[in-house]
Image (cartoon, rainbow, N blue to C red):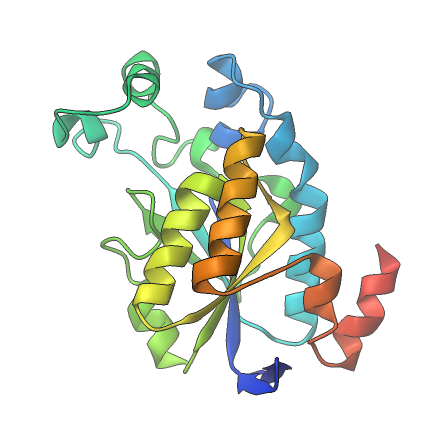
Amino acid sequence: MTIINIQGHNVNPALVVIDVQNGFVSKDGSYDQLGMDVSHYQRVIPRISQLISLCRSVNIPIFYTQAVREKSGIDLLTNTHKILPKSREERIRTKPICVINTWDADIVDEIKPSPMDHIVIKRRDSAFQDTEISVWLKSIGIDTLAFCGIDTSICVEASLRDAFNNGYDVVLISDATASGNAKHFESTLEVVRDYYGLVMNVEEFGRHLPQRAEQLTGNY
């Protein structure tokens, strides 16, 4: 357990890294093959890596989410929704993305989980939808979650909102998250600031951590 102080309050935090997977981020991943611009996502990977290193250095638990789909397609959104945005439905029907047990679904090599980290398998946008994360967080007394990863305005925001509504204090790490749409990115940051919690960059977050992590912030 690592207690830190944020705005005068002692909290027991964990880091949640959302969906930094080959299918969304990497060259030749599903998004890249669909012709989507993944450069926005690639640019924040070094910052996510720095953030992970900071948290590991002071034993803050790290939870990675891994969005997956079954090869059979049984868990596709098109099986449960009659009305979907056209762009999302077209992607689903054109190419299966992040099929379980494939390279596409793997978390990118630059931020591979360590044996001490935790992987949350999810099949919907939110890390809290039908997953074990709530049980795991409660078992170690976590009360505050720092979020990073992709996409800021979709899975990151959905997870952060659910965390807040489940009673967790939340922090969004602004330079360790990215959206494919700049307007949506800024909108999420504004919504979080106004309604849910705090927005900090990696350096600002590092200042709240014990001395060992503070020293590491100067090495990046």
How far from the left and from the top, in percent, is residue 34? 46, 14
In front here: 32 or 87?
87
- Compared to residue 10, the image places residue 148 above or below, namely above
**Residue that appears at 84% across and 72% down:** 215
How far from the left and from the top, in percent, is residue 45? 66, 42
How many numbered callouts?
Answer: 0
How far from the left and from the top, in percent, is residue 146? 53, 63
Residue 21 in view, yes or no: no
Left or right for 169, reference 171 = left
**Residue that appears at 69% across and 76% down:** 208
User: Where is residue 128, by image quadrant?
Assistant: bottom left
How far from the left and from the top, in percent, is residue 41? 60, 34
Left or right for 57, reference 135 = right
- Compared to residue 208, the image places residue 109 above or below, namely above
User: Where is residue 139, by image quadrant?
Assistant: bottom left
Left or right for 190, reference 83 = right
**Residue that appears at 60% across and 22% down:** 27
In front here: 47 or 59?
47
- Compared to residue 89, the image places residue 177 above or below, namely below
Residue lying at the far right of the rendered structure: 218
Residue 184 in view, yes or no: yes
Q: Quadrant of the C terminus?
A: bottom right
- Compared to residue 133, the image places residue 189 above or below, namely above
